[in-house]
Image: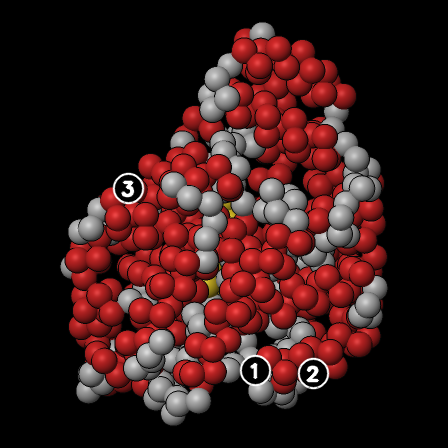
């Protein structure tokens, strides 16, 4: 059995190596690749996608899993070996239902689509990318239909990102959250908006990047196993547990973009860098779900990085970097500026209170597109109408409307967005559990110290990678299933103080 187990791990390592090579090509395409390389890059990505799929769905892996089943049953449920075999079986059974040729087609298409999107968005040219998006929708439906018997066509697309959740579960959580959020949004946006003009000045790019990366490293980001580069739409990527990279983007006339993008992607990277090294090259060596992954980006970006305590320590440092811009701006004015609540156009720049309304809009559109209730050609108008209904403002163009997110242009439609809101909910739940275990965490943040919080997260989340499912890791770490209550308590406390709200 030990020999068979090692043979399985060797085969899984080969699959992982191919995916890591594909990941490196994607990182290059998103950072430094010249536009002329797009066609060849799409072909290269398709080849690697097909090869990795063929290797993972090799019948030899199925035979090894079958032979190892008695071994798995003899092990404790939460042993490393049993968890690896259980996870591999689940992913193998899913993968063998999808033809390798289809995987290659989709990979080639999404790589081409991404390149077109990078040019179409700044040109505000939805029609240019529309045929690609229509093809993406076709592929998305085909992908779902490889898994018949679903309750909703989105279920098979949600499953690989947030295992254990279906469209109905997400809709239920979103409905509960929306009911609690809307009154807060209304109460805040009926007031005079906070003055954030201090953030809209000239901030040299080099200094922005240096400050953000310094904070990132103080959070715990290991630069011996990472680096930061610029891109169109910030992301974190991992080629191995020793090579976890982050990206950001800058606007020299707005301080918040690069800074909070860096902190956001740092949260993702801390998760991946915290996974046990002996999981390297196996399916266990990655975050367990999009929701849990986003919980870390949102926790470090918002709960820590937008907190008053954090800026008690870091604001004097930021003022010393930008004395002309911020030297005369009081900390309370700066704190209100970075936590300004308003009905805004861009999801990635949205405040904590309205952010989830952006996610819900996109999730609802995904369901409508997959169900056939909405056609791609009608998406821009539907976006404007829904945006006006939810936010009271109309996007002036598609660039800041339907074209703003990369997800549908570099992946399938379905399962793309629910993780962001699940992450907001879970981030507060994990932080509440950490501070209950270590009440000193808030005061340490005020002193620019993050090791206690980072260590708790490593112990209860990071080290386990995908060893446990998201529901299992949430129960183990917090003692309760997913709940919106810690998140709502956090929002009501923080923004109740900022905007003088009463129940």
Earlier sequence position, callout 1 versus callout 3: 1
> In the rendering, at what x and y percent does residue 76 appear?
48, 17
> In the rendering, at what x and y percent does residue 149 appear?
80, 42
Report whether residue 241 is seen: no
Q: Residues within 10 Å of mark 2 (few under 14, many from 20)?
A: some
Q: Residue at x 77, y 52 (%)?
A: 153
Numbered badge on residue 257: none
For residue 368, which quarter of the picture?
A: bottom right
Q: Residue at x 63, y 70 (%)?
A: 361
What residue did someone put label 1 on?
A: 391
Disc 1 element: helix
What residue did someone put label 2 on?
A: 385
**In the depicted structure, whether residue 56 falls above or below residue 397:** above
Camera-side mark, 1 or 3: 1
Q: Nearer the viewer, residue 306 or 279?
A: 306
Disc 2 element: helix
What residue did someone put label 3 on?
A: 455
**In the depicted structure, whether residue 450 falls above or below residue 71:** below
Q: CA distance from mark 1 to mark 3?
A: 39 Å
């Amino acid at each position: 059995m030990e020999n068979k187990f090692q043979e399985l791990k060797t085969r899984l390592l080969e699959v992982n190596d191919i995916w890591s090579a594909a990941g490196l090509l994607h990182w290059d395409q998103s950072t430094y690749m010249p536009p002329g390389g797009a066609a060849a890059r799409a072909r290269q990505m398709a080849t690697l996608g097909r090869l990795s799929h063929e290797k993972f769905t090799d019948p030899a892996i199925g035979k090894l899993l079958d032979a190892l089943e008695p071994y798995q049953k003899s092990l404790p449920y939460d042993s490393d070996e049993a968890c690896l075999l259980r996870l591999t079986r689940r992913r193998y059974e899913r993968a063998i239902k999808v033809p390798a040729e289809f995987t290659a087609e989709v990979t080639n298409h999404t790589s081409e689509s991404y390149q077109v999107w990078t040019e179409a968005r700044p040109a505000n040219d939805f029609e240019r990318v529309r045929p690609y998006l229509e093809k993406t929708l076709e592929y998305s439906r085909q992908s779902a239909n490889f898994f018949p018997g679903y309750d909703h066509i989105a279920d098979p697309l949600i499953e690989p990102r947030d295992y254990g959740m279906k469209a109905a579960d997400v809709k239920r959580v979103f409905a509960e959250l929306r009911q609690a959020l809307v009154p807060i949004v209304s109460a805040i946006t009926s007031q005079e908006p906070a003055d954030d003009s201090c953030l809209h000045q000239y901030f040299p790019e080099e200094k922005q990047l240096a400050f953000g990366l310094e904070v990132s490293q103080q959070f715990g980001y290991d630069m011996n196993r990472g680096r930061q580069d610029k891109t169109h739409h910030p992301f974190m990527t991992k080629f191995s547990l020793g090579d976890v990279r982050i990206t950001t983007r800058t606007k020299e006339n707005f301080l918040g973009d690069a800074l909070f993008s860096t902190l956001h992607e740092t949260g993702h990277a801390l998760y991946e860098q915290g996974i046990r090294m002996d999981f390297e090259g196996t399916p266990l060596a990655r975050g367990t779900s999009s929701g849990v992954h986003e919980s870390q980006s949102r926790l470090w970006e918002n709960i820590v990085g937008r907190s008053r305590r954090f800026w008690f320590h870091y604001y004097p440092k930021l003022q010393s970097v930008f004395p002309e811009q911020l030297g005369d701006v009081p900390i309370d004015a700066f704190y209100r500026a970075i936590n300004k609540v308003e009905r805004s156009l861009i999801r990635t720049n949205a405040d904590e209170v309205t952010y989830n309304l952006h996610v819900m809009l996109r999730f609802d559109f995904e369901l409508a597109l997959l169900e056939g209730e909405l056609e791609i050609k009608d998406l821009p108008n539907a976006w404007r109408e829904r945006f006006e209904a939810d936010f009271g403002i109309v996007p002036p163009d598609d660039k800041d409307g339907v074209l703003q997110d990369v997800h549908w242009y570099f992946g399938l439609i379905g399962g793309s967005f629910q993780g962001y809101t699940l992450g907001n909910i879970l981030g507060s739940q994990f932080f509440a559990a950490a501070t209950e275990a270590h009440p000193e965490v808030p005061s340490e943040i005020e002193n620019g110290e993050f090791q206690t919080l980072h260590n708790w997260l490593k112990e209860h989340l990071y080290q386990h990678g995908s060893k446990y499912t998201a529901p299992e890791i949430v129960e183990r770490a917090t003692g309760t299933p997913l709940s919106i209550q810690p998140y709502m308590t956090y929002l009501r406390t923080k923004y109740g103080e900022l905007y003088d709200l009463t129940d």
